[in-house]
Amino acid sequence: MINKKIKKNWHVPKGQELTELDKKVLYYQNKGCLVPKRSLIKTPEQIEGIRRSGVVNTGVLDLIAKEIHAGMSTAEIDRLVYEYTVGHGAIPAPLNYEGFPKSVCTSINEVVCHGIPSKDEILEEGDIVNVDVSTILDGYYSDASRMFVIGETSPEKQKLVDVARECLEIGMQAARPFGFVGDIGNAIQRHAHKNGFSVVRDLCGHGVGLEFHEDPEVEHFGRKGTGMLLVPGMVFTIEPMINMGTYEVFVDEEDGWTVVTEDELPSAQWEHTFLMTEQGLEILTY
Ligand code: MF3
Ligand code: CO
């Protein structure tokens, strides 16, 4: 039976002739599938804008890759991000976003995400650090993060970092045009579990481009064939957070941002912004 609660998101303005894409998406919508709003399909001009934003975003991460070292504070990372971004005519998206006080998220070891840079937080040999960079250029948003290993870390933490990266790649490969968001999460979850790790459930990837967070929600777990239909022209992140122990997390009460694993075991995350094409996903944050 068709789930009547599923919103009929795809709406073609009255009097407008149906394109081949409209016909295809309406076919899925009429079958009862959750489809995106038509406005989530980016125009070529919007895609170019997001792509240019992604170039700056990648430049920031490449700079951090060069500069990050033991003994440095996360506030120094924040300053590098701010100066590079502004120097390239862009704005760091996190700065003042819903009250976030800094230009970048820096999340060390058991911190899952949304860590706030601080002059009192010094990187140490063996730390694994996520640096999550988001950029606004000419109104277009891009979002990507990488893990950095400070010097050498333990084999377990190194494996966590590697498997989290593989999860992003495998999730990317699982995403096909006219497949579903759940295909991505399912592939990621399988790979994490196969390696003895868990997947954070409380935070997810998201549409991005004209705003920081748009539809769809991209969960990193779930069942194939569920969630929103993936249509060429959609732009979204995949950003799996993979934990060594439990998938459960909590938010630091004092700052209201820092997300930490419940068991305080380490967590790792990699993220890219992707464009869905007729051939599959293209990375916009290389
Ligand atoms: N990539 C992160 C996200 O999409 C960036 C968060 S920035 C913050 O959630 F300002 F919200 F912390
Ligand atoms: Co994101």
Image (cartoon, rainbow, N blue to C red):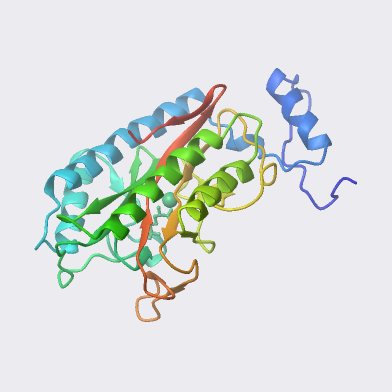
Residue 17 in view of the camera: yes
**Relative image position of residue 173 (x, y in whole percent):** 51, 34
Residue 104 in view of the camera: no
55 sits to left or right of 240: left
Residue sitting farthest toward the left: 71
**Relative image position of residue 64 (x, y in whole percent):** 19, 47
**How many numbered circles are shown?**
0
183 sits to left or right of 256: right
102 sits to left or right of 234: left
Q: Residue at x 61, y 29 (%)?
A: 177
Q: Residue at x 39, y 49 (%)?
A: 163
**Relative image position of residue 30 (x, y in whole percent):** 83, 35
In the figure, residue 60 lies in which quadrant? Answer: top left
Where is the C terminus found, in terms of image quarters? Answer: top left
**Relative image position of residue 13 (x, y in whole percent):** 73, 30
Residue sitting farthest toward the bottom: 254
In this view of the protein, which residue sits in the foreground, 270 or 82? 270
In this view of the protein, which residue sits in the foreground, 80 or 161? 161
In this view of the protein, which residue sits in the foreground, 175 or 42? 175
User: Measured along the vertical axis of the image, is residue 66 above or below residue 153?
Assistant: above
In this view of the protein, which residue sits in the foreground, 229 or 179? 179
Q: Residue at x 41, y 32 (%)?
A: 283
